[in-house]
Image (cartoon, rainbow, N blue to C red):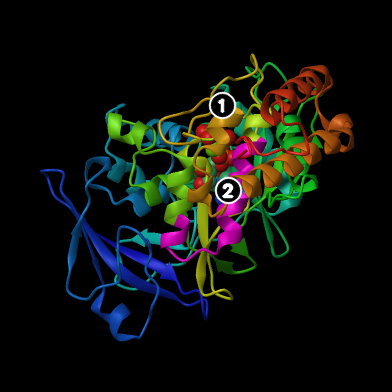
Amino acid sequence: MVYVYLQRPDNGQWVVVGRYAHDRGGIGRFRYAPSYIESGARWTIDPVNLPLVADREWTAPRYAGLHDILRDASPDAWGQGLIRRETGVGENATPFHYLLNSGNGDRWGALAVGTGRKPNIAGLGSPRIDTLDDLVKELLAIANHQPAINPSVRRRLFATASLGGVRPKLTVRDGDTYWLAKPTIHTDITDIARLEAATQRWGSEAGLNFAQATYRSMEGGRGVVLVKRFDREGPQRFMTASSATLLQVQYPPVTPADVAGASYPRLAEELRRIGAPSEDWKELFGRMVFNAMVGNDDDHCRNHAVYYRERDGAWRLSPAFDVVPSTEDTPKTLQLQLSRGSREISRVSILADYRRFGFHAIEEAQRFMGTLIERIADTFDIIRDQLPPDMVEVMELRVQTNKVLLLGEAGPENKPARKPKP
Ligand SMILES: Nc1ncnc2c1ncn2[C@@H]1O[C@H](COP(=O)(O)OP(=O)(O)OP(=O)(O)O)[C@@H](O)[C@H]1O
Ligand SMILES: [Mg+2]
């Protein structure tokens, strides 16, 4: 049994929000703490799967008995690998094992776990940005299975490792800002960190809400991307939920339903259902167009998220993160369906479910899409020099080709696809 702690969005206090028990049969149960409910707290930790109800036990339908939101607060492939190295468990360790053995320091969102009845908030700090070089060197040594350069730095990296994702990563703090740092690794065929930083900037230049990112070069010609964490601001953490959680699908997918349920228009509907405003549904539509244009086919369910903003009193679509164009051939499909049943990168597929994103008429969606595509193509010039040199031509060609493909014959003026009635 573990206690689940939450940093309250209003006053920053850490409280026990509930408890989670996992029995031998693999059944996981979560219950909100009576003290939490009696305190007048009104925040659910998962707006889809765990409504705030007193005296009710919720069993977890996915992840071998771990609730989706606790799975979100657990590591994926990178952190899981470190935990296996540290604890000696095998490949078939349970999701609960990874939750238990990952630290609260860099954990995603505003949840933490522990065995004490009182929230234990020791060890929540992140290393300072001026130690970045040493941290990254050690991180790369871990990734390359090399001996420790500095054992205490290595211990620190092993002790956190709670964030998701496949790539090596760590978090550093610079004043009130927290940065997720991801270096290029030796198996990357290009300087991925540089590509990611440039693409995040590109999304912002095109008018979308992308997490701020910068690139730092390191010894040896490759570098590290620093992405601003949207779930941290000074001492305050913000609640988060992945789109896998909102869509009630597992990522990585296990069942056919996990694949069938992963879709942009469904996600737009979930945003609406949990109270995010229409600008967020359209922003999501815009990100789908952006991913199609730049060929980011790693747009899976853990690469989209919402976070809770106290000042809005609502869950909002988070800034976009981990948007990285494929370094292989130009993708023909995305990970999520663009419209019901279709993952194909095409004009028809993007526009087919326009209503589900909150557009009232297809012309409105076409105009939005047309303007955005022009902006993405135009702003390429701003980021061209920030790309890895070997990706400039690839991306230039890709954007030109996709612009023609996605604007279709109607061109930028976006003449209605339907024939006017005689
Ligand atoms: N800017 C951010 N602010 C807050 N959390 C973030 C941010 N970027 C990423 N995360 C969290 O960290 C996780 C891992 O980050 P990211 O997706 O960039 O890593 P990755 O290893 O490249 O992932 P993937 O396995 O999808 O390639 C995300 O799934 C998300 O939970
Ligand atoms: Mg990711």
Answer with the quarter of the image where residue 42 lies. Answer: bottom left
The residue shown at (22%, 47%) is 61
The answer to whether residue 1 shows anywhere in this view is no
Q: Which mark is residue 143?
A: 1
Q: Residues within 10 Å of mark 1 (few under 14, many from 20)?
A: some
In this rendering, is residue 274 above or below 162? below
**Circle 2 is placed at which residue position?**
284
Measured from the top left, where is residue 223 in percent x and y?
76, 31
56 within the magenta span: no
> SS of the residue at dot 1?
helix
Drawn side of residue 320 relative to residue 415, left or right = left
> SS of the residue at dot 2?
helix
Instruction: Say which amino acid is labelled 1.
Output: Ala
Measured from the top left, where is residue 58 in percent x and y?
20, 60
Q: Dividing the image into 4 quarters, which one contains the N terminus?
A: bottom left
Q: Which mark is residue 60?
A: none
Instruction: Say which amino acid is labelled 2.
Output: Leu
Q: Residues within 10 Å of mark 2 (few under 14, many from 20)?
A: many
Q: Dividing the image into 4 quarters, which one contains the C terminus?
A: top right
